[in-house]
Amino acid sequence: VNGKDVVMPLVGAGTWQYNDTVAYDSVCKAFANGYNMVDTAHGYGNERGVGQAIQDCWLGAGKAREDLFVMTKLEGGLNSTETLAAHADNMEWLQLDYVDHLMTHFPADWYMTPERSTPERRQEEWLALESIYNTGAARSIGISHYCTQHIDDIMEVATVKPSVNQVEYHIGSGDIDEVITKCADEGIYFMSFSPLCGPCTYEPEDSLVSGDLVTKIAAKYTHADGSAVDGSQVALRWIVQQALPEAPGYAPFIAGVIPKSDTSSHQASNANLFDFELSLEDMQTLSAATKPEAEGGDCDVTVKSAKHPLDAVPEYGKVSEVRDQGQGLGRVLAIVRKSEEPRGSTALQTALRNWPDISAWYGGHAFSQAQGLEQAAHQKRVVV
């Protein structure tokens, strides 16, 4: 970063969809299992829990702050003032003076409102991140969900190059939005989120934990202590190994993984990736897989569907009006939220699941509390 090395671990603890209580417990367990990187976000609503875990279970255990890598994000589509204010929240909630990596979470706001989805707004937010970097409140800065054209927007004005682009990447995904090559060309590290395809829909045989392909390959390997390698370790190792220059399948500018679990044994397993090496043949086999599929769409944050499936849900008669105004999914959900009772929640849930362009949103991106529509209906509200 600007000629200075910033060393980032290859495996970190994810916290997406966790509230403060679960995040605290999960991060403390992760530290006990040897993790030294944690990933969170302003929009996750759990930075207080993560921050307290750092205080109690890292610093409180006598470990040095400089040995911990803290990564967080700010919502996309913010102007300069909003960006600075949001990072002030980060610092307060995390109880830190700086983070090791700060990124903008999406190339627009989650609502995809037109004024917050422009190249100019991406550039304004990026320059605000640079100002945060220049104060020392972030040791490195980056982007998430960014596609080629979004990266070009940033590079037009950047004086500090993005260090990382965090994008969905796992066995079966391929280069879902054709951005891996762009990142390598620009010298930006490409980091995987959802490395086990957590939000994906797939058949059991395609699972990256216990599916046929990863289980078959795992059977070839053992750990140094003689224990068996499992399918999820193969899936995670496939990504991590691409980041190791001397290993078969090395790919320049591939970074690490941030698997998520609040189960201690799973956390330990997810980090136990460095005492076996996949053969080049197995790396190539895994790279050629086409399932489980990833969901694209981040490259088209301002492109609207010609026909929205929510039109079929009578309770939400204003959906067409919002769509035609080009306000995006977030505005649709904002109207839904105003309903006293989302009586069409079952139909709405089905519509969201079946519309490819927003299946990723259903996975939690549009729901800051990540409750999902079914639970939201129970609560008599939809959270956006």
Image: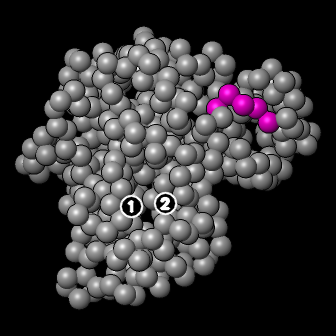
Q: CA distance from mark 2 to mark 1?
A: 7 Å
Q: Nearer the viewer, residue 378 or 124?
A: 124
Lower position in the chain sequence, tag 2 or tag 1: 2
Specify the quadrant of the image occupied by residue 357.
top right
**Quarter holding the N terminus?**
top left
Give the main secondary structure, helix, strand or loop, of the magenta stretch: loop
Q: Please, is residue 240 above or below residue 87 in the view?
A: below
Specify the quadrant of the image occupied by residue 102.
top left
> With 270 as the anchor, is 348 left or right in this view?
right
Mark 2 nearby-residue class (10 Å; few <14, some 14–19, many ≥20): many
> With 295 as the anchor, is 325 left or right in this view?
right
Residue depicted at x 46% and y 14%: 124
Image disc number at residue 239 = 1
Q: How is the image coloured?
A: one colour
Q: Tell me where residue 49 appears, x and y as whole percent.
A: 34, 42
Q: Nearer the viewer, residue 44 or 6?
A: 6
Residues under numbered marks 2 and 1 in contact, where contact means CB atoms less than 8 Å apart = yes
Q: Nearer the viewer, residue 282 or 137?
A: 282
**Mark 2 belongs to which amino acid?**
His
Is-magenta flag for residue 214? no
Q: Tell me where residue 117 appears, x and y as whole percent.
A: 60, 22
Q: Is residue 325 visible?
A: yes
Q: Which residues are magenta?
A: 301-305
Q: Please, is residue 147 above or below residue 335 in the view?
A: below
Residue depicted at x 24% and y 51%: 9
Q: Is residue 78 visible?
A: no
Residue depicted at x 63% and y 47%: 296
Mark 1 nearby-residue class (10 Å; few <14, some 14–19, many ≥20): many
Say which residue label 2 marks. Answer: 170
